[in-house]
Amino acid sequence: MAIGAVGFAQAVRALEVEDDAIRAILRRRVEVEKRSVGMAVCVATPDRKRIVTWGRERLSDDRPVTSRTVFEIGSVTKVFTAQLLGEMAHRGEVGLDDPVARHLPGDFHVPEFNGRKITLADLATHTSGLPRFPPLPGIPLSPSWLEALTRFSVEDFKAWLADLHLERMPGAGWEYSNAVGYTLLGLALAYRGGRPYQALLQLRVIEPVGLEETTFHPTAAMESRLTEGHDAALKSVPPFELGIFNPAGGLRSTPRDMARFAAAILPGSGSRIAPAVQLLLTTRRPASPIGGMQALGWEVHEAPGGAFMSKDGVTVGQAASMVFDPDRRVAVVAFSNSLPDLRSSTPSGGGVGSADIARYLLRPQIPLDGQGGTTY
């Protein structure tokens, strides 16, 4: 089905974009541009959820992507960790400005800068001053580097953290602490909650929303629906494992589950987790490198049509992106089982793969990567 650019934009603004129009975008990305093997898109409002898919779960067979296909969602995991922080802060169990060391075992030595301690909010807004990763052998994302990342233990983390010296004051500036900041946040929340991180996330966030297949460790029933990751040349890559760094990017989920989560965080959803979302969004710090503000877990972008929230996730072979507009009460989640070209980006952030599609469906003024005013 073809649809003109003006008509398509009007349809998006009315939240009535047709499934065939979305399917045409996914088909082009998979079959014409050949930048993915399989994709899915969810469009959610508080009372309606739709899922559109195209392509295959892996190159080696013809099994199609469905609403139950299990994707790696990478750093979209961070919004789950931030949501857990929001839930615990909403209950008064932690304070956003609490030093993280207050909620860690006594043998954790967290670095300071001129007496300024790293707080929970610093971690959740990437303003802690902590680096992206601990030092690991090999080049980032190489097999040796990934193996070292998976084998890095909590004891290794403690020892490295104890010797770390911050280069600037926490809270003074934004720098994406990819694995380190959210791992430390996850460890602190788990210790304060008296449960392992995964169990606490399950109890406080996953179960209240009714997510059935969002986990760090897929069940036997999910194994047959795990999508295979692919590199930029569409060659298969092994599954992505993060070990102790799971709070930063280790979740797997399905389009069906993520549609439920997207609907639950929107104003008016009436979900048990919705009140804490407002807490996440009202805490913001400048983040000029991403062209906007950083809330707890969520990036805030100013764009034609008004501000929207986003979080993108990339693993070694998959990509996921989630964007939402709290005023219009609509969210879009997009998935790809292929690694995006990280050298390219959309005007409001995110590499090719799924980020540009999610943004375009929410804000048609933001063009699809490489397409400009292309008519679908």
Image (cartoon, rainbow, N blue to C red):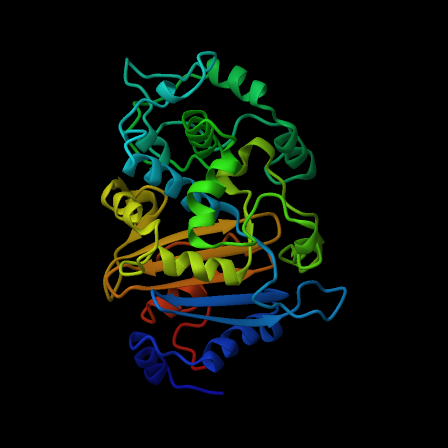
Picture quadrant of residue 128 = top left
Query: Is residue 236 found left or right of 88 in the rendered image?
Result: right
Q: Residue at x 64, y 65 (%)?
A: 37
Q: Residue at x 61, y 32 (%)?
A: 149
Query: Is residue 213 found left or right of 82 in the rendered image?
Result: right
Q: Above or below — where is 108 with respect to 145?
A: above
Name the residue furthest right. Answer: 60
Query: Is residue 209 found left or right of 326 in the rendered image?
Result: right
Q: Residue at x 36, y 37 (%)?
A: 85
Q: Nearer the viewer, residue 144 or 260?
A: 260
Q: Position of residue 303 (x, y in %)?
A: 27, 61
Q: Above or below — where is 169 with respect to 235?
A: above
Residue 353: tell me if it is visible. no
Q: Count the labels in the image.
A: 0
Q: Position of residue 325 (x, y in %)?
A: 29, 61
Picture quadrant of residue 373 = bottom left
Q: Position of residue 32 (x, y in %)?
A: 59, 75
Residue 207: tell me if it is visible. yes
Q: Position of residue 185 (x, y in %)?
A: 42, 31
Q: Nearer the viewer, residue 335 or 370?
A: 335
Query: Is residue 220 found left or right of 340 in the rendered image?
Result: right
Q: Nearer the viewer, residue 219 or 136?
A: 219
